Image: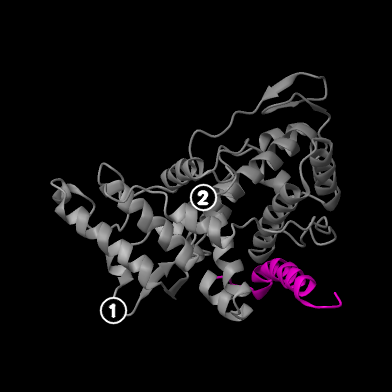
Amino acid sequence: METKTFAAVAGSIMNENKLIDEFLNYLRFERHFSPHTAKCYAADLNQFCEFIADHGGGSVEMPGSSGGYGMSDGGGTAVAVAPPSTGTSTMPVISRELMLGIETEDVRRFLAFLRDQEYSKSTTARKLATLRSFFKFCLKRGYVPSNPLAPIRTPKQDKRLPKFLGEEEVRKLLETPEVNTLLGARDRAMLETMYSTGVRVSELVDLNIEDVDFVGEALHIRGKGKKERVTPISPTALAWIKRYMEMRRADARAAAFDQQAVFVNKHGQRLSTRSVRRKLDKYLAIAGLPPDVSPHTLRHSFATHMLNRGADLRSVQELLGHQSLSTTQIYTHLTTDRMKQVYDQAHPRA
């Protein structure tokens, strides 16, 4: 492959990173990724673009580095390359030619850079997955002849079991909110719903009143990637939702509240995921439970307790909305440990 001069590269620099914007739009509108997930992909690509802008890549010879968004010419003079002011991405502006000329060795150098910066294996694997997805997209669109990530293996991950609360700890947490107030009743209903159904916090705050089936004891969930599912909910959780809704309707400001959302903040607007986390932190402190518990911990707790009490893995997969059974199988490590404890305690010759 012919090596280009820096002048040729500088002349081909685009005003916007249209290729990457095209990829991000593909994630949002064709793959139905959430805005948060697309934002994470954009951040990973941003870092990769910065690395390539600083160190060069592909068939393009980059004689020097000036750091940030600058690139150096052969004489050591920095040539400023400003980030785009428009477009959906905020990448350092590098040429389409340079991005599509990325080779396997460039990716290996990027991975070495991440290792030198002491990134964790999980973070490195995520960034690698972003690049795989991007170049797979480029290959699918016919922009590149091959995927430079094909020869690269994802670093082996350290097995990290999901954190979960014991059944008594969950009970203590659920009973913490002061339910005589509207916001306290809301928080009790919220916690009960998360533990009863195992929904993600994003799914919880997206719930609309019409999604709650009081007769059929089920919730209509809009999950990741626009996937929808119907999941059972316990009579206890439904009773707390009903009590909260009755208190909400009786509130003098009820007419100004969001009439669709199940869970609203003190101003009557749909609750955010950040607000749910803040409320959980408050009740963890009151209950004397570990502060590192997150809303996702209740999801882990739901899955672990279901399996401990005899639910089969496939059913739990459906309840959690996991696309792959392998995602759910991590919980079997927890239940295996539990069974081993029971065995050791119960078997006379253990």
Residue 340 part of the magenta segment? yes
Q: Nearer the viewer, residue 155 or 31?
A: 155
Element under disc 1: loop
> What amino acid is at disc 1?
Val
**Residue drawn at the location 67% of the way across and 53% of the way down:** 130
Q: Nearer the viewer, residue 315 or 61?
A: 315
Element under disc 2: helix
Instruction: Identify the mark at residue 63; answer none if there is no mark.
Output: none
**Residue drawn at the location 83% of the way across and 59% of the way down:** 153
Q: Position of residue 55 (x, y in %)?
A: 80, 34
Residue 22 in view of the camera: no
> What amino acid is at disc 2?
His
Residue 207 lies left or right of residue 146; in this view the side is left
Q: Residues within 10 Å of mark 2 (few under 14, many from 20)?
A: few
Q: Nearer the viewer, residue 178 or 277?
A: 178
Q: Earlier in the sequence, mark 1 or mark 2?
A: 2
Which residue does the numbered mark 1 point to in the structure image? 215
Which residue does the numbered mark 2 point to in the structure image? 36
Check if mark 1's residue and mark 2's residue have beta carbons within 8 Å: no
Residue 264 part of the magenta segment? no
Q: Position of residue 350 (x, y in %)?
A: 85, 74
Residue 252 lies left or right of residue 264; in this view the side is left
Residue 49 lies left or right of residue 1; in this view the side is left
| Quadrant position of residue 241 | bottom left
Mark 1 and mark 2: span between their CA atoms? Answer: 34 Å
Q: Which residues are magenta?
A: 321-350
